[in-house]
Amino acid sequence: MQIKRIIIVMLSLVLITIMGCQHQKPAEQDLLRVKSEQGATHKKVIFLMVDSLMSQAIDKGISQKQLPTFQYLIEQGQYHKDMVSSFPTMSVTIDSTMLTGKYPNGHGVPGLLWYSSDDKKMINYGTGPMEILRQGINPVLTDALIHLNGKHLHPDSRTIYEDLARVGLKSGSINGLIYRGATEHTLTIPDWIQGPTSLQKQIKVKGPDFLTLGALSNPLEGAENLPDNLTDRMGLNNKYAIEALNYLIQANKLPDFLYVYLPDMDQELHKKGPSSLEGVKKLDQQLESVLNSFGSREKALNQAIFVIAGDSGMTQLLPANQRSVIDMPAMLRGISVLKPGEEVKPETEVALAVNETMAYVYNFKPNRSLRSLAEILSKDDRIDFVAWKENEWMHVLQGSSLKELRYKAKGNLIDRYKQTWTVKQDAEVLDLTLNADHRTLDYGQYPDVLERLSGSLNSHKGKFLVVTAKPGYELADRSSPTHEGGGGHGSLRRTESLVPLIIVGTNEKPEYLRMVDLKAYLLDMLTNHVQKTK
């Protein structure tokens, strides 16, 4: 998702800069240091994060005999249809969770769009072209390319790349926007991007042993002719990522762990809705090419462990004539709402950070309570719920009904993840099933909702609400991108939160089927395999 938005930023820049400038290719080479040192008996782990991959599409495609590679992988390994994503269900937050093993309260990246009270500005990693132009191309690119990994991702939340370096294992990232590691790299900014911004020509960053971010960091330049021109979206596409992966396989340069981000399906489903199969059929062919790069399917599974995951699901949105877009400034009529690109002024009362079907609403007026704002927003029958934090308690107000639930961490109720809670008032607000006799708590429409919502409400400083839309609807500020009749995500519901997980080449399973538990699973698997081969 985030990489796709940055692509839009870059293409927008083309329209406002002099055409014909040739971008310089980066000179950095990673191939000498990337290869695993563990030998041929040590299986490499290849993790493919597929933006908006859903089990419904996989099942439908297999039933129609259109996904032979997916069918083969599932028959040879594990297929889980209900792994719980992070929240909000936006790629930059999800990737941060997967790579650090923490929810936003631990890793510090609360969404695609959020307000930083320290910097006193809206942080935007790349939402839509109009919103980016209003926020400013320079700050968006600076936050996405420099601050996201260098500042916003909490330094105490080590990534899997940093942990693997500590134990002497090699790692790599192909087009992952979250890439912080222990090895120095250089991002090279094309002239046509650098011109209208204050970005330096070369930006020093730290990442895994092998790092590619499209044309901004292409360590295979001169070794492999990858599609990274303007017409190829600067290399931020599936074709680039798959060709880079296939090169490392064929050149016998695979690291111990390689993360590959595949963004193409997200844009298709936003436009056509979650029922479209075109993207998953193309992906099936790309996966077949990866297996064949080893020489055969059988050799691939003998030499590598494949982990394929979706990052979030999607909800089918209603068409525009059915009020699918919830105009948030209109809901707050009479209140001074910060306009995109403006600075917070003394008279500013509220700021909106809309993440499709989820939004943060920031309150800057000291004498207005969060509850009063929540009650205004909850009156709309398209709002699912509004939540906020007061001291240690999380408050959740259901849309339309105004029923309320309160909860806090620690208590006499235990959930399936061994987390304990205290829950007061109306449990049906979050579709919870409480069993007082057994002291258990079960989740319904909102998987792991208490921990995920708490992680969001404790993710950054400030007084703010979390707002989610009911299925079929999406939230919008004045210049937010909208997807009427297409697909949307961001919220806590099952359709946007449960994603597929396919594991082939090992019988080992994660302790829990949650995105937040994958880092520990991968580290254990990698380090255990190394110890067994010594």
Image: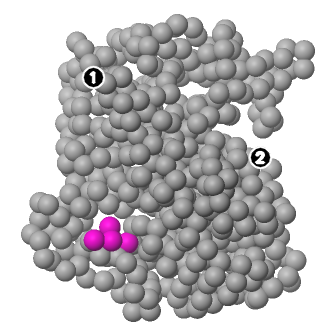
Which type of secondary structure does the marked residue at label 1 adopt?
helix
Residue 49 percent coordinates (x, y): 57, 60
Residue pushed farthest left?
Answer: 18
Q: CA distance from mark 1 to mark 2?
A: 40 Å
Q: Which residue is pictured at 56% across the width and 18% down the height?
A: 396
Residue type at mark 2 is Tyr
Q: 460 or 113: nearer the eye?
A: 113
Name the amino acid type tagged 1.
Pro
* Mark 1 touches mark 2? (CB < 8 Å): no
**Coloured how?**
one colour
Tell me the residue at 84%/76% (across/down).
531
Label 2: few (<14), some or many (≥20) within 10 Å?
some
Identify the main secondary structure in magenta.
helix
| Precedes in sequence: disc 1 or disc 2 | 1
Magenta highlight on residue 392: no
In the visual, does 22 lie left or right of 441?
Answer: left
- The residue under label 1 is 329
Residue 196 locus on image (x, y percent): 15, 63
Q: Residue 304: x, y in percent?
A: 72, 76
Region of the chain picked out in magenta, as a range: 231-235
